[in-house]
Amino acid sequence: MNVILKRIYSNTKFTLGVFSIDGKTICYTIEDVKQAVKVYSETRIPAGVYQITEFNGSRFTKSYKSKFKGHGGMLLLQNVPNFSGILIHAGNSSKDTAGCILPGLTHEINKDFIGSSFAAYNLIYFPIIEKLRANKKVFIEIIDEN
């Protein structure tokens, strides 16, 4: 499985990206901004390649299990330098993240907002979790274009 997050737009408030699996664009993403010095809940993670694992210790786990049939643990990015607990989860703006990746089906290029986040999350979560449950390793490559 080839998972890529390509960051395509960034300003002083948020970063917009495009999330793809196996060459197919799935959705947009919103994250915090790039900063030279990390500021909690305001800084995006560095570009790089990170293993994704299933994590059951998140505050989101219980509510997502009740929202989504077949949902287990959350998708967690491993070994992110100077960060911990980086998840892929639903949300609509950079205010909803503390370094995590938020998916959405719609966006406006100059607005800190993505729409239909839970629908986009479903499109990401289930293909990835299927591989993880089959004991396959899954990695995400995060590329800075902006």
Image: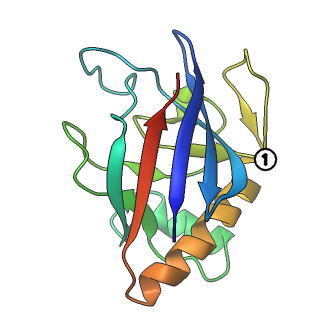
In terms of depth relative to the viewer, which is nearer, 3 or 69?
Answer: 3
Measured as percent of width and height from the top left, residue 61 is found at 47, 66
Farthest top residue in view: 12
Measured as percent of width and height from the top left, residue 45 is found at 35, 35
Compared with 59, 11 (above or below) is: above
Q: How is the image coloured?
A: rainbow
Compared with 79, 123 (above or below) is: below
Q: Give the residue at mark 1.
A: 116
Compared with 5, 119 (above or below) is: below
Residue shown at the point (54%, 14%) measured from the top left: 13
Residue shown at the point (65%, 58%) measured from the top left: 121
Measured as percent of width and height from the top left, residue 146 is found at 52, 21
Residue shown at the point (49%, 81%) measured from the top left: 131
Residue 10 appears in the figure: yes
User: Relative to residue 55, is residue 101 drawn left or right?
Assistant: right
In terms of depth relative to the viewer, which is nearer, 73 or 36?
Answer: 36
What's under tag 1, amino acid-wise? Ser
Mark 1 neighbour density, 10 Å: few (under 14) some (14–19) many (20 or more): some
